[in-house]
Image: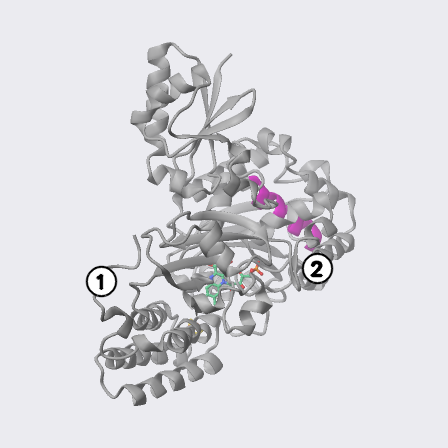
Amino acid sequence: MKMRIFVPRDAGAIAVGADDVVAALELAAAKRDLPIQIIRTGSRGLYWLEPMVEVATVKGRVAYGPVSPADVPSLFEAVASDGPHALRLGVADEIPWLKRQTRLTFARCGVIDPRSLDDYRAHGGYRGFERALSLAPDAVLADLTTSGLRGRGGAGFPTGIKWKTVAQTRASRKYIVCNADEGDSGTFADRMIMEGDPFVVIEGMTVAGITVGASKGYIYIRSEYPHAVEAMNAAIAAAKRGGFLGTRIGGSTHSFDLEVRVGAGAYVCGEETSLLESLEGRRGIVRAKPPLPAHKGLFGKPTVINNVLSFAAIPFILDNGAKAYADFGMGRSRGTMPIQLAGNIRFGGLFETAFGVTLGELVDDIGGGTFTGRPVRAVQVGGPLGAYFPRTLFDTPFDYEAFAVRDGLIGHGGVVVFDDTVDMAKQARFAMEFCAIESCGKCTPCRIGSTRGVETIDRIRRGERVAENLAVVEDLCNTMKFGSLCALGGFTPYPVMSALKHFKEDFGAAPTHLQAGIGGSSCP
Ligand SMILES: Cc1cc2nc3c(=O)[nH]c(=O)nc-3n(C[C@H](O)[C@H](O)[C@H](O)COP(=O)(O)O)c2cc1C
Ligand code: SF4
């Protein structure tokens, strides 16, 4: 019998040598005349252990990592003798970092072959779709509302309400659009699921189509994600061959088709109306709302636009019931959140868990503190528009409302850690500079305010009339917050003001906490 070996084809694993490990495995097996079957999976999300290789045994899939091509001969010997190996991690499902997660959305990621529709179906795929087919659209909408699912793209808008609005709007055509622009710093969950379990995104979008009465969908993927584009295209082709896309899908009377579109490379193209402009072939500029995309979206037609993770949560909800999802979480944040731990962190990766885990647990316990071993000083949650949290706020639970109360946001679930060498005035300047570079230019507070913000923070950093310039920054932030058309200009004040509020000592000619001679970068 062939030895079954699983190696991720995830871009993160490939970046650290997964393809070279596959080549070494093939070569070593050929030399030994050992029949093997290599199955390329997604990543389990334990990135410090990539490339992680799993070997099927009677005990389950035994994992080894991080594996380099040089480790392959000794790895074969260890597998043959069921003996110890320095890189042996035990049965993959039992690895504590994985075991303590609640994987509802990412249950199959790293487990199945993302190119195989049969593997997807063998692991519960398309059961949610089949249930949706058996229900009236109103019942699907009721389930979605009961589940409490809120959009995972950042704004946290209730998905059930959005779908209901589109379902109730009369039109000759409607569209489903998946927002896979994933521009937030420190985020990679959309990419991971598209590469590791693309059918779950397709299934979620298909359910949206049959529920609101749309027969066409688009997946807008950022151009920096070529592996995700390839994975989604391969899965769409397989779903078409299997009768799950096209006409009379799943033997029903419904038609639904999907197409991948590659983004042009602008952060603002992740903003939903700007994304629709880009999809229509124009420059990505934000549209004024109303009308909402749910009423007048793509090509002026009612459109459901959701984040990748929002669509990917749908199959579980329909398959297992709304209550099974809503049972997890806290307050109005129901279900689980695929949290992405990044930056200067020891155990970086994807950690899916119920809402309610505290920031301190995430950073110190699950993340293991900083990669450099220095003390954690600041954590930015929610991408480039998210606030910086100091240690004193580490008791904040991961929950939309709890973060908002503390002038922060959870956004798309990105957590970026900085050690005590970080210069927070520099980070505040970066926030303004990012906004200036990425601004679509439609409104003045964002277009002009961000550039004035950079100049003013530069003056503060040079020690010029610090108190007066700090007042100018605050004034600029208020103008941007209340006067901008979209959240790019409107939320840039969050990182700036939080840096000012919690790390005021850094704003002046020389940050006082760096005067003791701590130097270097805050990231590994
Ligand atoms: C500047 C800016 C960038 C955004 N980038 C993304 C993105 O990359 N991905 C995403 O899903 N949502 C992004 N959003 C949020 C979208 O506008 C929108 O809220 C989301 O696609 C709705 O889907 P959801 O309800 O499933 O979250 C961005 C918003 C702004 C203002
Ligand atoms: S806030 Fe910035 S990105 Fe948003 S519409 Fe105004 S100029 Fe464009």
Amino acid under disc 2 = Ala
Task: Specify whether residue 203 is painted magenta.
Answer: yes
Residue denoted by label 1:
519
**Observer-nearest of 447 and 76:** 76
**Residue in the image at 44% along x and 70% along y:** 488
Few, some or many residues within 10 Å of mark 1 (<14, 14–19, 20+):
few
The relative height of residue 205 versus residue 470 in the rendered view (above or below) is above
> In the picture, residue 141 is in which quadrant?
bottom right
Tell which residue pokes out farthest to the top in this image: 33
Q: Position of residue 471 (x, y in %)?
A: 36, 88
Q: Earlier in the sequence, mark 2 or mark 1?
A: 2
The relative height of residue 366 versus residue 411 in the rendered view (above or below) is above
Q: Which residues are magenta?
A: 199-212
> In the picture, residue 81 is in which quadrant?
top left
* Foreground: disc 2 or disc 1: 1
Name the image colouring.
one colour
The relative height of residue 35 versus residue 171 in the rendered view (above or below) is above
Q: Secondary structure at mark 2?
A: helix
Which mark is on residue 167?
2
**Residue in the image at 54% along x and 30% along y:** 116
**Observer-nearest of 121 and 364:** 364
Query: Magenta region, mostly helix, strand or loop?
Result: helix
